[in-house]
């Protein structure tokens, strides 16, 4: 019997040392002593700055929201501007505009020059260049209101705004009005290029492959796939309400002859047959475990022997939590009320239970964009 089992009230030595060490660092007198030791003072200062970053994170986000909503960063693309110009265009007093612009400078988005002139920095310009990022920042107003009482959210005691923004998740395909499905598709489409770019670095397709993109919206991932692999056949499977927007989008992009749209709901009916691969791009994390297992089973049944399933979406870090998956997406999907950020290993295990084999978890180029799980029937 181990020491832990033979002495249930005694902490294991390593755990005891860690506990005592943490208790020591939480003591204000010890912190004061550390501040007087040069080497330890630098460590304490760095940790202090990190802690303050955590404390002021929401304010940073709201400053960013104001800059996006007022289109101040966009206006600086035309060149540096005086605070008087910025304040007039944003309908702010010069004093308040200066506070906002100093905040933007502190966040590294702008730089302050002499005489109250502000210019865009590379980070600010890059923010504007990321597809869909400014739309997502505006959309965060819903999320942040849901996060106003995080304890209530954790206890499932709030009726969240995101659960109403994404009502397509909750029921049959005819329950979501056209306007809602358009809002969903537009928001997702804007950032899909980034996801497609990273996904297609992790997976390849052979000439003549037929690919079904389930839950593919207006076809943004399908377009990027067809653009990179010019000799494959691609179809999108999504709700009937999405079809008009998808047809228009595919036509406008010049892909209506290469990409077809098939209407249906993976909740209620089998997936179409005749495909070598099925892709689930940012789909699973929208849904509960039971819905995901049903979908994986439908995908398995639809594929022929040797067919591949590709899952790509932001994922939890599992045993090694990271900010994107275990802070942002974990709480975002919690606010959606049906979704869940899962680790690659969790998704792999779910696929294995259905019967998939040869499961591969490729190294993700950018985990904050997406990760992937690839498996074979």
Image: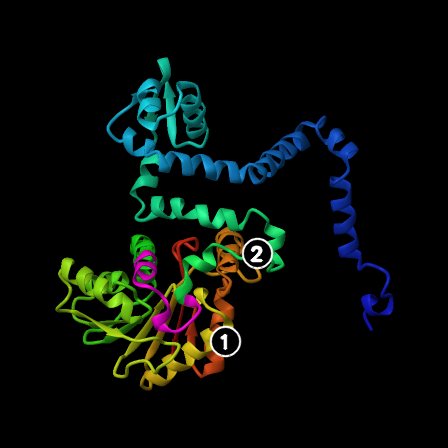
Q: Is residue 362 visible?
A: no
> Secondary structure beneath disc 1?
helix
Residue 341's place in the image compared with 270, above or below, is above
Percent coordinates x, y for residue 349 in the rendering: 50, 75
Image quadrant for the N terminus? bottom right
Residue 151's place in the image compared with 261, above or below, is above
Q: Which residues are magenta?
A: 169-183
Pair 1/2: label in front:
2
Percent coordinates x, y for residue 31 in the rendering: 73, 33
> Residue at 42% of width from left, 67% of height from top?
169
Way the structure is coloured: rainbow
Residue 4 occupies quadrant:
bottom right
Percent coordinates x, y for residue 372 in the rendering: 40, 65
Pointers 1 and 2 in contact (C-beta within 8 Å)? no
Task: Tell me the residue that label 2 is attached to.
Answer: 158
Task: Tell me the residue that label 1 is attached to.
Answer: 290
Residue 181 shown in magenta: yes
> Secondary structure beneath disc 2?
loop
Q: Nearer the viewer, residue 319 or 97?
A: 97
Percent coordinates x, y for residue 35 in the rendering: 70, 28
Q: Earlier in the sequence, mark 1 or mark 2?
A: 2
> Residue at 13% of width from left, 61% of height from top?
254
Image quadrant for the C terminus? bottom left
Q: Is residue 49 visible?
A: yes
Q: Few, some or many C-alpha atoms within 10 Å of disc 2 (few <14, some 14-19, many ≥20)?
A: some
Residue 308 occupies quadrant:
bottom left
Residue 312's place in the image compared with 145, above or below, is below
State the CA–CA distance, disc 1 to disc 2. 23 Å
Q: Which label number is shown at residue 326?
A: none
Q: How many marks?
A: 2
Q: Few, some or many C-alpha atoms within 10 Å of disc 1 (few <14, some 14-19, many ≥20)?
A: few
């Amino acid at each position: 019997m181990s020491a832990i089992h033979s002495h249930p009230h005694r902490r294991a030595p390593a755990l005891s040392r860690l506990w005592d060490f943490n208790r020591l660092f939480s003591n204000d007198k010890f912190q004061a002593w550390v501040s007087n030791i040069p080497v330890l003072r630098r460590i304490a200062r760095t940790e202090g700055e990190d802690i303050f970053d955590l404390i002021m994170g929401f304010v940073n986000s709201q400053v960013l929201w104001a800059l996006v909503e007022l289109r101040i960063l966009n206006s600086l693309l035309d060149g540096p501007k005086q605070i008087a110009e910025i304040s007039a265009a944003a309908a702010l007093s010069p004093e308040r505009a200066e506070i906002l612009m100093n905040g933007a400078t502190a966040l590294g988005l702008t730089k302050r020059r002499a005489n109250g002139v502000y210019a865009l920095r590379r980070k600010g310009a890059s923010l504007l260049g990321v597809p869909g990022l400014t739309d997502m920042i505006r959309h965060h107003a819903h999320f942040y209101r849901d996060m106003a009482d995080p304890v209530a959210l954790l206890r499932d005691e709030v009726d969240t705004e995101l659960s109403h923004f994404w009502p397509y998740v909750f029921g049959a395909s005819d329950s979501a009005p056209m306007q809602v499905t358009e809002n969903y598709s537009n928001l997702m489409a804007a950032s899909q290029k980034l996801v497609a770019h990273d996904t297609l670095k992790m997976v390849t397709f052979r000439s003549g492959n037929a690919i079904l993109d389930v839950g593919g919206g207006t076809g943004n991932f399908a377009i990027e796939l067809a653009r990179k692999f010019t000799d494959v056949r691609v179809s999108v499977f999504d709700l009937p309400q999405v079809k008009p927007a998808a047809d228009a989008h595919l036509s406008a992009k010049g892909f209506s002859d290469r990409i077809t749209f098939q209407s249906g709901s993976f909740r209620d009916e089998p997936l179409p047959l005749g495909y070598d691969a099925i892709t689930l791009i940012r789909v699973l994390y929208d849904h509960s475990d039971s819905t995901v297992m049903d979908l994986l089973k439908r995908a398995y049944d639809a594929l022929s022997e040797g067919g591949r399933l590709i899952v790509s979406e932001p994922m939890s870090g599992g045993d090694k939590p990271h900010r994107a998956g275990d802070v942002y997406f974990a709480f975002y999907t919690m606010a959606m009320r049906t979704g869940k950020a899962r680790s690659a290993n969790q998704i792999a295990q779910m696929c294995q239970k259905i019967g998939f084999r040869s499961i591969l978890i490729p190294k993700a180029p950018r985990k904050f964009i997406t990760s992937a799980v690839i498996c074979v029937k």
